[in-house]
Image (spheres, rainbow, N blue to C red):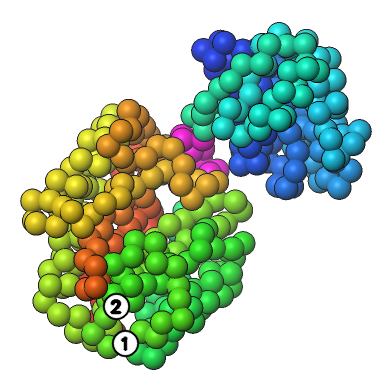
């Protein structure tokens, strides 16, 4: 079943008979159009992609299920969007409340005949369950980061800067077919490894330090997310103990992943595992998240989540322990939820590597 059909089937539950999509990621998901501007209008019978003059030919080639409409004025597209919405006979037009500005809302309210109905996660709800094609792209993105890790452990040594490591990772991933990194690469060594999001700095890596590498590859729009922590020389007994706790927490958590388990339950389990070993206060973030066209997307392993896992979701599992002034450890993999349990689609080695 394609995305258009799946979204239209949700119209009744959303209380709408048409949808305006302004989120760039949701626009790409619904249309396959990769341009950087445009809006989508969908009714029960029509589907239109509205773009400016730069993208007409590209949109016609990529968005094969959509009628492509060119804005009359690319700087102020409200008139064209409103005219098309009125022409489609929509009476209750859903809009993405998290992506439409108040200014745009007021202009549409003046010009569109339909009642404007705010919606939350109308398309994101569909994106949580990946298609066979999406899973294939995510697998390739995972293979790229696995290869990049195998190469970076040959590059890391005392005296090399974190930025040099990040640049090498970026270059290697692009060589393997990545469009870009999934996000700003994290390389955090020594005391900086206690920073969960320690983006690569000019700091030189020194002997006796842990180095946390958190990076991902974007392949045909889809993203991978891998974290490994390695030792350069002997980091000391406490950090080695912490490494084993984090590894055991990650492996134990992955074993529990299956369709039907709640995201809150998964998050609670990982945090409890680390808390029982005395490091609860040093694990302050969620246990993982969905990945796809965005690096962080629903669902999330979080205390307040009300969602449950379903077959076809692709999740990260990423417990960590971070001790200020000492260092930290995080280990992360990408996991496909299946009808029989789960499959880890990243395969870089996880036992502590000492360089």
Q: Earlier in the sequence, mark 1 or mark 2?
A: 2
Q: Give the tally of numbered discs.
A: 2
Work out how far the residue at label 1 is from the one at label 2, CA to CA, in angstroms. 7 Å
Q: Residue at x 58, y 73 (%)?
A: 175
- Residue 168 in the image: state x and y as whole percent: 51, 78
Q: Which residues are magenta?
A: 126-137
Is residue 8 positioned above or below 97 on the image? above
**In the rendering, at what x and y percent does residue 139 appear?**
47, 53
- Figure check: 120 above or below 150: above
Who's the residue at 81% across and 14% down the image?
A: 86
Q: Which residue is mark 1?
A: 206
State whether the magenta stretch is mostly helix, strand or loop.
helix
Quadrant for the C terminus in the image = bottom left
Image location of residue 18, percent across then percent down: 67, 17
Q: Residue, x 31% and y 87% (percent of image)?
A: 206
Residue 129 inside the magenta-drawn segment:
yes
Numbered tag placed on residue 190 in the rendering: 2
């Amino acid at each position: 079943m394609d995305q258009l059909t799946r979204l239209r089937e949700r119209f009744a539950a959303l209380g709408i008979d048409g949808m305006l999509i302004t989120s760039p990621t949701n626009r790409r998901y619904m249309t396959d159009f990769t341009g950087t501007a445009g809006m989508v209008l969908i009714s029960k019978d029509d589907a239109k992609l509205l773009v400016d003059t730069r993208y007409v030919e590209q949109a016609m080639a990529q968005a094969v299920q959509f009628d492509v409409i060119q804005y009359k004025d690319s700087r102020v597209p409200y008139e064209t969007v409103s005219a098309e919405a009125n022409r489609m006979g929509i009476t209750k037009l859903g809009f993405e409340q998290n992506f439409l500005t108040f200014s745009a809302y007021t202009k549409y309210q003046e010009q569109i005949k339909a009642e404007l109905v705010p919606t939350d996660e109308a398309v994101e709800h569909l994106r949580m369950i990946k298609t066979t094609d999406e899973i294939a792209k995510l697998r390739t993105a995972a293979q790229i980061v696995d290869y990049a890790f195998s190469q970076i452990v040959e590059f890391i040594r005392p005296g090399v800067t974190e930025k040099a490591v990040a640049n090498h990772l970026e270059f290697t991933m692009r060589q393997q077919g990545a469009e870009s990194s999934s996000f700003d690469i994290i390389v955090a060594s020594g005391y900086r490894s206690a920073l969960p999001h320690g983006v690569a700095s000019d700091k030189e890596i020194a002997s006796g330090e842990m180095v946390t590498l958190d990076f991902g590859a974007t392949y045909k729009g889809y993203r991978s997310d891998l974290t490994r922590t390695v030792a350069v020389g002997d980091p000391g007994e406490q950090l080695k103990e912490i490494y084993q706790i984090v590894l055991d927490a990650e492996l134990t958590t992955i074993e529990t992943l299956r369709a039907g388990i709640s995201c809150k339950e998964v998050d609670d389990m990982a945090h409890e595992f680390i808390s029982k070993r005395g490091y609860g206060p040093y694990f302050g973030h969620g246990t993982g998240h969905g990945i796809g066209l965005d690096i962080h997307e629903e669902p999330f392993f979080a205390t307040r989540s009300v969602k449950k896992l379903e077959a076809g979701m692709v999740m990260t599992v990423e417990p960590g322990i971070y001790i200020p002034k000492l260092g930290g450890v995080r280990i992360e993999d990408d996991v496909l939820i299946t009808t029989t349990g789960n499959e880890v689609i990243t395969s870089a080695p996880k036992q502590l590597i000492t360089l």
